[in-house]
Amino acid sequence: MLFTSIIYFLFLVSSLVGYYLLPPRYRNYYLIIVSALFYMYVKPSYLILIIFIIVTNYWIGIQIEKSNRKQKSGFLYLSLFINLGILIFFKYWNFLIENLFQLVGLLGVSNTNSPPFLDIVLPIGLSYYIFQIIGYNIDINRGTIKAETNIFDFSLFVLFFPKLMVGPIERANHFLPQLKKRILFKKENIVEGGKRIVWGLFKKLVVADRISIYHDAVMSTVNQQSGATILFASVLYTFQVYADFSGYTDIALGTARMFGYDLMENFKRPLLAKNVGDFWRRWHISLSSWVSDYIFNPIAFKRRDWGNFGVFYALIISFVVIGIWHGATWNYVLFGIVQALALIYETLTRRARKNIAKKVNTVLYRDISIVLTFTFITFSLIIFQSATFSDALNIMKAMFSNHGKFFFDDPPQLTFMLIGCVMLILCDIQEEFRIFNFSLFSNKNWMIQQIAFSLLLVYILIAGVFDGGEFIYFAF
Amino acid sequence: MKWINVKENRSGFQFLLKSFFFVAGLFVFDYSIGSLLKYLYFKQNSGPLYEITYSIDSTKADLLIIGSSTAHHDYHPSPFQNRLGVSYYNTSNDGTSLLYHYAVLKSILKRYSPKIVILGFDIGEFKSDQKSYDRLSALLPYYQNHSELRPIIELRSEFEKIKLLSKIYPFNSTIFSVFIRNPYFTGYNLKRKADDNGYVPLNRFDNEPMEIDVPDLKFDPDSNKIDFFKSFIKDCKLSNVDLYIVISPRFIKYPVKDPSVELAKEISDRYNVPFYNYSRDTLFLKHNEYFADRVHLNDNGAKVFSNMIIDRILQNEQKNSVSKKNSWSADSDKK
């Protein structure tokens, strides 16, 4: 059920009505049923898997808390074995088997058997909720949270439908306490949630899906396109991925808000990041902070005797995990390594850059930093968007060697794309730097605000792409 | 009703009132902007959107080309006009499928019966493909006034009727084209060239090497497309239209037979409709100078190909008149 589909909005409205008609003590049970139905709509058999994951992790969580130190580790390893085992089986099996067979071939061992590939579909949202559950168990092991003893609250922690398919990867200490509160109907939740959904729809339908038409046309004929066209499409892709994923997150957060819950923010204007480190503090925050808390910090702490090399080691491991989390291909691993290398470079040059910053005009230094970071991200996303490493190299080669005309087949299409990108970036700039004193979408005058949102909806109807357009992050 | 927040309930009326104003405002914006877009859409006098309106509402040509981009670029009007002495119009629309082609035929047959229809059939035409349904969006502006198109447009999605409650939605993505192609706004009249007749020539030349393409052997046919193909043939027969189903030349080698083509040929044979497959024609496979790209002919290639099709039509007419004559003489012998 796509968040931009009519069926989703019918589902949302009917669920909301039922939710607020019920007494508060029954609302969480109702949400579990609604969330299960939502997940079943994608594929009913997925529900069996998620129920298994919920039940086993509910039990393991309690066991970790109850046990002594030695046993705690045992239960934590059991949790990791089950959860990562499921993730590897569904997401990485074919990748691992293929590479194992290639390695065996390289070692000169003759093998006439064909690799035992599995023809299975990755259950939607698996990577998100598995990471969320692993975080929960680690937190119990560390003693930062208590194990959830109410299986219904734990079920809703995993199943809550707005975040089920594409996150955010919630943290137990943020979300579980909210499930204990009595949720009352508040008009602010409906209004603010609604506004967030409209903005998400704009990002997804008007910006991301519109760019996707042009980007796909260019990248599917990359050898026939000029370097300038490929560069332009690559820049647009950065906007596309941002608008796609953050648009989805906005709809998820808006939906959750309507039900009275606050999910964690996943994006903080990442295209205005001043360096790569800053970018990863603003981009897919729920994943990067998860990796920071559960992978980077423990490794960096363990390797603190290594000095800077310990940090670099932790960075490489963390970003390989971030890369491979996106998918079972080497280009994602490479994408992660490139990010880690950029962060290592930033660590090594921090002092030198600070010295330069002191000598240059602050605004100019900031703006140049933003442009350079954006350029780096755009180029690294070429690896991210390519199916293989050789495809990425081919795109980069074509970008610097192909001559010819600039491709803009359809001027109205280009106009829609540019208007969308300008609106998106202007809103981010306004939120980041507060350039204008006047704001349309958060104006105190409700009339101005209502007209602004009505016109935004009208613009979505005029310029949105309503045909197809899966969310890019569904694939992960 | 303890669970309803009493304090919030006091301002409930205000909330409902504001919600009402929001919805009412949205409705007013949608209705007024949608009506304006509709007016401007149907005032266009050139461009691809105008050509759809002309195909559906106005053309009275004797010979019609119906198809996708291949048909749009591969049939040159002048050989048809000169050698057959008929009026020509090309109703083809890029990226469309049989779903769209049948919709166009239905609206045309509602007005008149052309003498000849050439249906451009594409390789893999019967394959299930969401894009074919998405491209029916080109027909959304005609939903309100063309009842014959409604069942086809509604195939886009089960919620299409709900979406069409919006006045703007049918004109989604057309706003800039509508303004550019409108003499009221551009200040000059971009009139359709008299000799174009819906045909869009491609004047480039393909210098890419020949491609070898193995069609997807997992044949997952779309039953709607197959049904529409049959209906297309039946409707033409009922309206006494001479139908020719043609696959355009390609600069691609197909080592295996395409299941869609095989099935289309079988159905055409069953209904005794001429079916010409030029995708393996050696003349074109040896001459890449006839192509703009691997699947579209350039202007020169379109002329050569159109003449080949005209030869086929003339042969067919001759054959038909001989068989009619023979059956007439056989009938008179019996008498």
Image (cartoon, helix red, strand yellow):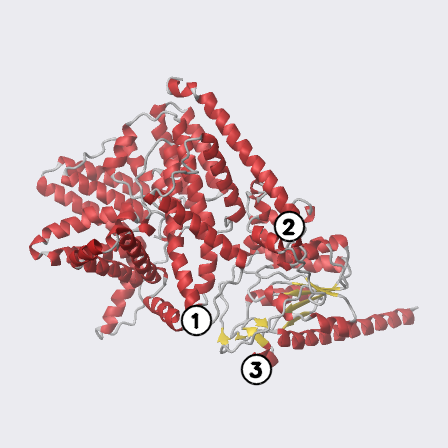
**Disc 2 from disc 3: Cα separation:** 44 Å
Q: In the image, which disc is placed on residue A65? A: none
Query: Residue A138 appears at what percent x and percent y?
Result: 18, 43
Residue A198 appears in which quarter of the rendering? Answer: top left
**Whether residue A100 is situated above or below residue A62 in the rendered picture:** below
Q: In the image, which disc is placed on residue B41? A: 2
**Whether residue A429 is situated above or below residue B79 in the rendered picture:** above
Which of the chains bears the disc numbered 2?
B
Which label sits in the foreground, 2 or 1? 2
Residue A353 appears in which quarter of the rendering? Answer: bottom left
Identify the amino acid type marked 1: Asn
Query: Residue A238 appears at what percent x and percent y?
Result: 37, 56
**Whether residue B249 is situated above or below residue A82 in the rendered picture:** below
Which of the chains bears the disc numbered 3?
B
Tell me how many marks there are: 3
Q: Secondary structure at mark 3?
A: loop
Which label sits in the foreground, 2 or 3? 2
Using residue A175 as the reference point, say whether residue B278 is left or right of it.
Answer: right
Q: Nearer the viewer, residue B104 or A227?
A: A227
CA neighbours of label 1 inside 10 A, class few (<14), some (14 to 19), many (20+) = some
Q: Residue at x 49, y 27 (%)?
A: B18
Identify the amino acid type marked 3: Lys
The residue wearing badge 1 is A223
**Disc 2 from disc 1: Cα separation:** 37 Å
State the quadrant of the C terminus of chain B: bottom right
Looking at the image, tell me whether mark 2 or mark 3 is earlier in sequence order.
Answer: 2
**The residue positioned farthest toward the right in the image shown:** B335
